[in-house]
């Protein structure tokens, strides 16, 4: 089981969250990108851009924050945080 917890924050308050589960035999990278697609669909967001700093943070901590710099359109929150909470 592979699970990612996604949270949207504004002013240090949690606005929305969801957990995406994936049982497929895909690679970790494919599971992460599939989860991002589901998260963006559920939260009605455009897909964020993975900047080098975001990739490095995700590699080190299995957690990443996407702020306004990662989105093309304007967002009405401070950041979207994803965190891998379970890996197979």
Image: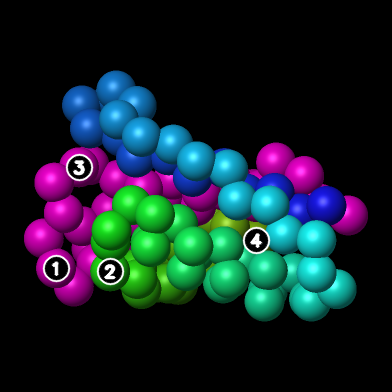
In the rendered structure, which disc, 4 or 3, sits on the residue that comes first in sequence? 4
Q: Which residue is mark 1?
A: 73
The reply to whether callout 1 and callout 3 are in contact (CB within 8 Å) is no
Residue at position x 38%, y 63% from top?
Answer: 41
The reply to whether callout 4 and callout 1 are in contact (CB within 8 Å) is no
Q: CA distance from mark 3 to mark 2?
A: 13 Å
In the rendered structure, which disc, 1 or 2, sits on the residue that comes first in sequence? 2
Q: CA distance from mark 4 to mark 2?
A: 23 Å
Residue 56 visible in the current orientation: no
Q: Is residue 62 above or below residue 74?
A: above
Residue at position x 54%, y 56% from top?
Answer: 57
Q: CA distance from mark 4 to mark 1?
A: 26 Å
In the rendered structure, which disc, 3 or 2, sits on the residue that comes first in sequence? 2
Q: Is residue 76 magenta?
A: yes
Q: Residues within 10 Å of mark 2 (few under 14, many from 20)?
A: some
What colouring method underlies this structural image?
rainbow
Q: Residue 77 versus residue 43: which sits nearer the camera?
A: 43
Question: Magenta region: which residues?
Answer: 61-88
The reply to whether callout 3 and callout 2 are in contact (CB within 8 Å) is no
In the rendered structure, which disc, 4 or 2, sits on the residue that comes first in sequence? 2
| Horizontal and vertical percent position of residue 46 | 28, 69
Q: CA distance from mark 1 to mark 2?
A: 7 Å
Residue at position x 36%, y 48% from top?
Answer: 80
To which quarter of the image does residue 9 belong? top left
Q: Which residue is mark 2?
A: 46
Q: Which mark is residue 59?
A: 4
Residue 63 visible in the current orientation: yes
Q: CA distance from mark 4 to mark 3?
A: 24 Å
Helix, strand or loop for disc 3: loop
Q: Is residue 64 left or right of residue 43?
A: right
Q: Which residue is mark 3?
A: 77
| Horizontal and vertical percent position of residue 14 | 34, 27
């Amino acid at each position: 089981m592979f699970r990612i917890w996604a949270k949207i924050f504004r002013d240090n308050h949690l606005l929305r969250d969801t957990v995406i589960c994936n049982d497929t035999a895909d690679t970790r990278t494919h599971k992460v990108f599939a989860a991002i697609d589901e998260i963006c669909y559920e939260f009605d967001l455009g897909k964020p851009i993975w900047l080098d700093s975001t990739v490095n943070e995700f590699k080190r901590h299995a957690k990443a924050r996407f702020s306004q710099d990662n989105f093309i359109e304007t967002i009405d929150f401070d950041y979207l945080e994803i965190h891998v909470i379970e890996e197979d």
